[in-house]
Amino acid sequence: MMMLNSGYVFIPLTLVGCGGWVFTSKCKHLLNTLLSLEFIMLGIFFVLSNCLSVSGNEMYFVLFFLSMVACEGALGLSLLVSIVRTHGNDHYNSFSILQC
């Protein structure tokens, strides 16, 4: 229980909670949503790396998770660039399902 007292779990869970709050709030821009997703993934990465290093397990899963997060970020940025090129901005109000 030394792990819970030293803040190894409280700080990353606060990061995940704040990122989830921003993600579910009414954001007007797609870029804010993508940044909040990256913030959530950073908190989860912090939790995984701390828990696995304290328990003495191998860090292969953390490296796999980090590579998936990098792929998710690249995919999100490519979608953002294509949306900005087609619609001119990243406001949610200017998107229409019928145009896609």
Image (cartoon, rainbow, N blue to C red):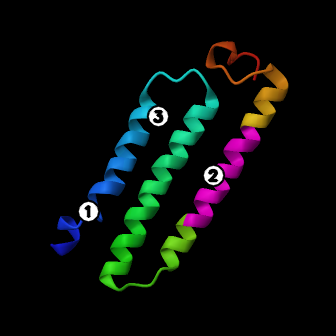
Residue marked by disc 3:
23
Q: Quadrant of the N terminus?
A: bottom left
Q: Is residue 52 left or right of residue 42?
A: left
Q: Magenta span: helix, strand or loop, mainly?
A: helix
How far, Cα to Cα, is label 2 from label 1? Answer: 28 Å
Residue marked by disc 1:
7
| Label 2 Cα neighbours within 10 Å, binned few <14 / some 14-19 / many ≥20 | some
Q: Residue at x 35, y 43 (%)?
A: 17
Circle 3 or circle 2, nearest the eye: 3
Q: Which residues are magenta?
A: 66-79
How far, Cα to Cα, is label 3 from label 2? Answer: 16 Å
Residue marked by disc 2:
72
Q: Quadrant of the C terminus?
A: top right
What's the residue type where badge 3 is placed? Answer: Phe
Residue 93, located in which quarter of the rendered image? top right
Circle 3 or circle 1, nearest the eye: 1
What's the residue type where badge 2 is placed? Answer: Glu
Q: Residue at x 27, y 56 (%)?
A: 10
Q: Is residue 35 left or right of residue 71?
A: left
The image position of residue 58, as x and y in percent, is 44, 84
| Label 1 Cα neighbours within 10 Å, binned few <14 / some 14-19 / many ≥20 | few
Tag count: 3
